Image (cartoon, helix red, strand yellow):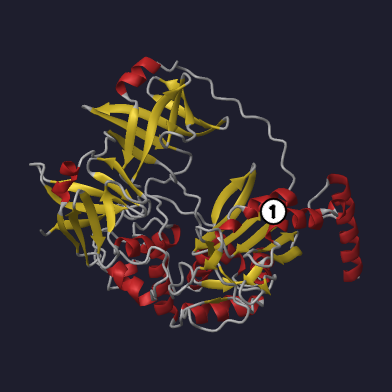
Amino acid sequence: MVVLIRVHLRIASLILGTLFGNPGSSADTGLEQRLNETLSRFTAQDAPGVAVGVVLHGELVYAKGFGMANIEQGSPITPKSPFYIASASKQFTAACAALLVERGQLRLSDDVRTHLPELPDYGHKITVDHLIHHTSGVREWSSLILFRGEDPRYEQHISQDDVFRLLCRQNQLNSDPGSEYRYSSGGYVLLTAILERVSGRSLREFSREEIFEPLGMDQTRFEDNYAELLPGRVDSYRRTSNGQYERFLKHFDVYGDGGLVTTVGDMAKWDANFRSQRIGGNRFLKLMGSKGRLIDGREIPYAFGLESKSYRGRSTIEHNGGMLGYRADYIRFPDDDCSVIVLGNSSEAAGVVYQVIDQVLPIPHEKPMALPDATAKTDLVAVETEFLGHYWIASSNMYRRLTIADGRLLLDWGPQTDGDQLVAVSPDRFRVIRNGVPIGLVTLRKRGAEALLEYSSSSSVGDFRAVRYDPTPPEATKEVEQFVGEYYSEELDVTYELFLNGDALILKMGEAIPRQLFPPGESVVWNSKDMVFVKFGEIIFRRNSSGDVVGLAIGDSRVRGVNFVRTR
């Protein structure tokens, strides 16, 4: 009787699919052919590639590998090839936390210093919830590694203990816990330490016993020893300047923020658990989908290692990952009962997931959104006089530019970049329009002689406050020779040395190879007389009330700034 009912349901599903064109139904028999054509550029036998999985209505309807897992050995990628998935691992670390919360062994409200007394007392309580949702203020460890002057390609050995000790040296946070969202893999390294101490098991053991084995994810594990043998391992690659491929080696053991090795087939089994609830149950799944909330009550889209977004008008639940040459994308469309998995071993895999999605889900016929009615005309003359120019965003160490082009007020990233149009809704407030769609609101105001720009959106993610500044760079050696000296950071335990070599200003960061700052060398941009971008971070020289250079700070989009004191 049960079999008969299932047969009837399957027939009904096929009929409905034929009538309404549901993806994966009998009306879509060309899906495999379309995907094969879309991915055909990865079929070379001397290049890296991708593994792709498509899950429709709970069934893995497409699973295929393209390109080479190991070019030297001629080993092809298959759906069973194990890939390192970088930050896409966070959903599994968060899932382990959710299981402990569900069992009453861990509370989201726990003060992290209760479990990790090694951490400094920042004067504000950081909770487990803050770590999971990236609202803790804890700095990004991968940025700190670069600021120490270590290998910018991350090919040196870095252990979990190395990163934990580095995080414990940080005596400052990016922001007060709960006040803002800022993605931090450092927070997930701390979360991992908590999970291991609470459970009494390593994350690798706990996740294997509680998640991977029950779901039959036999080729999935957290990798805590990069040198461990792994049959069929997919290697990472990058292109050289002559267009050839070379290996991009993983020599670090950091996990919890990343560190997971898995396959397309195993990811499909994980995806199935969101329907079957085989592990965790209903409360577990609710926790996995629970979004973070800031002190001011605003909800953020980041949940338990998964993020709520949208693509072409469809709601998604997703997380990606990228490290070395590895790329990983897991995107679930809950309203369409569809998930897409793409794992790659070179940067060329970036964006492939959306090409796959476009073949799986028909692009909706979206009506163009009407621009909001302007309640005030933009007084371009007044704006030009009072507000045009470059604005520095201290929280993310970058700038935006307010400019006028073809009679339109634009917010862009500088010359030769596309800008978002600003449409006035009041004399000092503007809708931010991108591709005809409102995406945010800008407020312009004055604070004494300063011009301020405030950007806000429906959630807190991407909000910023910026101050107009003078972007004029130094033009002569005499303007930069004042920076010569030594600067020390206790938090990084490293010294920066700045010295002149003829007319050139040179920077040596710890044991790193010296780089030329002025005249600007490779990947060096001066954003003002006192601010210089050095490929992976912005250095801002600090002055006292007399104008003397007394220190510097280096930061990026994930670290507000690490301070250095001038020692010579």
Give x and y (percent) for residue 375: 47, 17
Q: From the viewer's perspective, is 230 left or right of 471?
A: right
| Residue 87 visible here | yes
- Which quadrant is home to the N terminus? bottom right
Residue 102 sits above or below residue 437 on the image:
below
- Please give the residue where the numbered disc 1 appears in the rendered image: 356
Q: Is residue 82 left or right of residue 294?
A: right
The picture quadrant where one finds residue 187 is: bottom left
Q: Nearer the viewer, residue 239 or 147?
A: 239
Q: Position of residue 301 (x, y in %)?
A: 50, 50
Closer to the camera in the image, 119 or 480: 480
Which residue is depicted at the point 42% across and 56% down? 183
Q: Quadrant of residue 376?
A: top left
Q: Residue at x 19, y 60 (%)?
A: 497
Please give left or right for residue 286 compared with residue 225 in the image: right
> Looking at this view, is 349 or 385 the one in front?
349
